[in-house]
Image (tube, grey):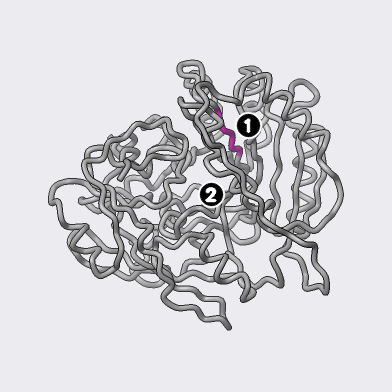
Amino acid sequence: MSAPSSWGRVCPSAPRELRSLCDRADARALLMGTPGVPVLAHGMGRSYGDVCLNSGGVLLRTTGLDRFIALDRAAGLLRCEAGVTLRQILELCLPMGWFLAVTPGTREVTVGGAIANDVHGKNHHAAGSFAHHLRRLELLRSTGERVVCGPGEHPELFAATVGGLGLTGLITWAEIELQPVANAFMTVRTTRFQDLGAFWELNAAAEAAWPYTVAWIDCLAQGARRGRGVFMAARHAAAQAQLPGWKERRRSMPVDPPVSLVNGLSLRAFNTLYWHRAREGTALSHYLPYFYPLDAIANWNRIYGRRGFYQYQCVLPPSSMREGIDALLQRISRSGEGSFLAVLKTFGDRPSLGMLSFARPGATLALDFPNRGASTLRLFEELDAVVAEAGGALYPAKDARMPPRMFRGSFARWEQFAGFVDPGFSSDFWRRVAK
């Protein structure tokens, strides 16, 4: 069995042992099999950095915990094992008229991973994060104790576990609320905008009427065009007699190129073409290209070459988000680094449930950066300074190099959270930021 890695492929890791979980009944024995050696659950490995890695410890592969336990088809309440993926939930529940209440930008993540990172989607202003639709879960601690917790049952342990990066124990099953839909299609309104000022106006108007909002940003545009992009607002399509045909087409990045295919020349050409070719107006779209465009390309992370890539995702509070996002884009465009994956969206006012939950009121910017070594890391230090001055935070699920002081400044409750960390669990990320 090959050693698991994270999606960005910039964090070398050598676990002492890999164990595959195939049954909830056997989980206790596997979990307690190596006393004194830290363990960590590992699902699909879609975290970009090192929150899913455990050098020198035991990694518990959870994808074998893939059973559906119960589904209330009338209420849309699903109980499943933690290794079930969001793809599997959609394949089962969408034909019955149910959809995920919150989904990140890929369906190739497990329920346990979605909980551990308290993932958010394009509808945070309307629905909050994944934890807001989580009724309860079972946590298996390294002592062998099984604890069922939820917002009204062991609430502090629940608050530590949602967004808790897998450090409070092994999630074995979860019960989540789904939302009703009429079909598999979305009504999507696409609008090009010329600069950041236009984005803020579009977004404020759209959030009042559309549950899903997100913008692609041209991260290389400068001057009067800085912050130009394409805004996409959406809602689930209403029931209708006739829907467009749809067939999923999957491609693959079959090899690792020796160097990144994302460079200044290719990026500038792509961004210019994408902005000009965006089709404005309102149209029906299947849910897959709206929510999960990159899932159509297997192993898309290989386009960044053998050195891998970083993702930098931050959130800035409402009081500083406009000036802060502009300052970040200035530095990114001036550096010439970045990628065609540059996403800007806003979070609503709904308080997060987790002690380490990332989503909070404000705006979040996410970009991928090919790993160019020292120059990329120097740019991140500049971006960190902007985020810190703005009172913002970085996202652990996407992080591979956050300094400890940045982590502590991003999460005011981190010391309270540390008291709930299971002493038998650890990760490369936690040892890096909590030292």
Identify the main secondary structure in magenta: strand
Question: Residue at point 76% right, 36% down?
Answer: 229
Q: Is residue 287 visible?
A: yes
Which residue reaches farthest left? 35
Question: Residue 195, percent across and down?
Answer: 78, 32
* Badge 2 element: loop
Residue 235 vs 272, above or below: the answer is below
Residue 157's quadrant in the figure?
Answer: bottom left
According to the picture, the residue beneath numbered tag 2 turns out to be 359
Give 3 or 130, whichever is nearer the viewer: 3
Give 22 or 332, whichever is nearer the viewer: 22
Residue 428 vs 155, above or below: the answer is above
Residue 126's quadrant in the figure?
Answer: bottom right
Neighbours of disc 1 within 10 Å: few (<14), some (14-19), many (20+): many
Q: Earlier in the sequence, mark 2 or mark 1?
A: 1
Question: Residue 108, percent across and down?
Answer: 51, 53
Question: Residue 20, percent across and down?
Answer: 29, 55
Q: Give the label on residue 314, or none.
A: none
Question: Residue 75, percent across and down?
Answer: 56, 80
Q: Is residue 141 left or right of residue 11?
A: left
The Cα atoms of the two marked residues, 2 and 1, are separated by 17 Å
Question: Residue at point 28% right, 37% down?
Answer: 431
* Badge 1 element: helix
Which residue reaches farthest bottom? 74
According to the picture, the residue beneath numbered tag 1 turns out to be 324
Q: Which region of the structure is painted magenta?
A: 365-369
Which residue reaches farthest front? 254
Q: Quadrant of the N terminus?
A: top left
Give 45 or 298, whichever is nearer the viewer: 298
Residue 116's quadrant in the figure?
Answer: bottom left
Q: How many marks?
A: 2
Is 105 covered by the magenta stretch? no
